Image (cartoon, rainbow, N blue to C red):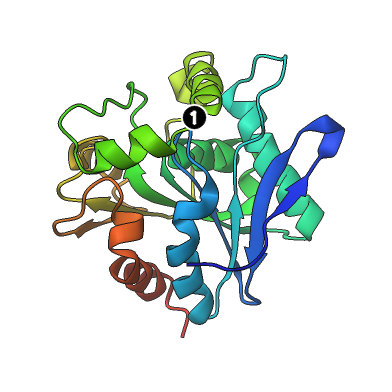
């Protein structure tokens, strides 16, 4: 797990947590809905060991204003600006991948590609029948952040966030046993941009494969980006 200290970036009163580690070309990781960035730490640490610069960007604390996916994408770009990251692969787990797609659509010149770790298709993330993932998520989800993010998704028309940005490559990684963001969603998205999107299954991976199968997931990312 990453031991690098988290920082808080507060542009215009927004409190956006992030962890920045490594010195290689940049890869951003955004967490699933309502979750803290902590559970991405193991994956981030493995990638740093493979000479990536990994920036984990969490969700801002809820405020008075209603948000859209475009606002959440702007938070990510503002952190990139703050850290001097001109462009990067933008990656996210589940809902984080929806934000990543929005970043790539809204700020095309800042994205080298999108990394989608389980594809959130925009439906409510049901936890039914997903134990032990259910148990972890029930404990770990911040209900206030979850509600804000769910509202942002509902307030944003699907064409404004769901597609893979034109001309950009995408790597889709998914757990074969993920019942929260099922593998079928990744297959549909890959088919929509088959010339640019690559799909890799993590055999036996559930919704939290980014943590339980961090080494395998990192190896897939490294092999795809050919970082050697």
Q: Residue furthest right?
A: 12
Vertical position of residue 136 compared to residue 114: above or below: above
Q: Is residue 136 left or right of residue 154?
A: left
Residue 160, position as x, y percentages in the image: 52, 25
Residue 124, position as x, y percentages in the image: 33, 21
Residue indicated by mark 1: 161
- Quadrant location of residue 179? top left
What is the secondary structure assignment of the residue under circle 1? loop
The residue shown at (19%, 26%) is: 128
- Quadrant location of residue 162? top left
Residue 192 visible in rendering: no
The residue shown at (66%, 77%) is: 23
Q: Is residue 89 left or right of residue 218?
A: right
Residue 102, position as x, y percentages in the image: 54, 35
Residue 30, position as x, y percentages in the image: 52, 47
Q: Residue furthest bottom?
A: 228
The residue shown at (71%, 20%) is: 63
């Amino acid at each position: 797990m990453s031991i690098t200290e988290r920082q808080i970036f507060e542009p215009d009163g927004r409190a956006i947590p992030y962890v920045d580690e490594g010195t290689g070309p940049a890869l951003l990781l955004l967490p699933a809905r309502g979750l803290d960035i902590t559970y991405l730490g193991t994956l981030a640490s493995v990638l740093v060991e493979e000479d990536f610069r990994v920036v984990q960007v969490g969700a801002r604390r809820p405020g008075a204003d209603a948000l859209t996916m475009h606002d959440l994408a702007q938070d990510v770009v503002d952190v990139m600006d703050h850290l001097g990251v001109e462009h990067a692969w933008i990656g996210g787990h589940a809902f984080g991948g929806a934000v990543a797609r929005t970043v790539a659509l809204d700020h095309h010149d800042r994205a080298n590609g999108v990394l989608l770790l389980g594809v959130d298709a925009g439906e409510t993330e049901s936890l039914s029948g997903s134990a032990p993932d259910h148990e972890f998520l029930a404990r770990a989800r911040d209900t206030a952040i979850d509600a804000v993010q769910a509202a942002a998704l509902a307030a944003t028309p699907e064409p404004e966030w769901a597609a893979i940005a034109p001309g950009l490559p995408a790597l889709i990684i998914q757990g074969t046993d993920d019942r929260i963001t099922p593998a079928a969603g990744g297959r549909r998205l890959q088919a929509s941009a088959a010339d640019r999107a690559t799909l890799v299954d993590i055999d036996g991976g559930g919704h939290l494969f980014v943590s339980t199968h961090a080494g395998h997931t990192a190896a897939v990312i490294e092999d795809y980006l050919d970082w050697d």
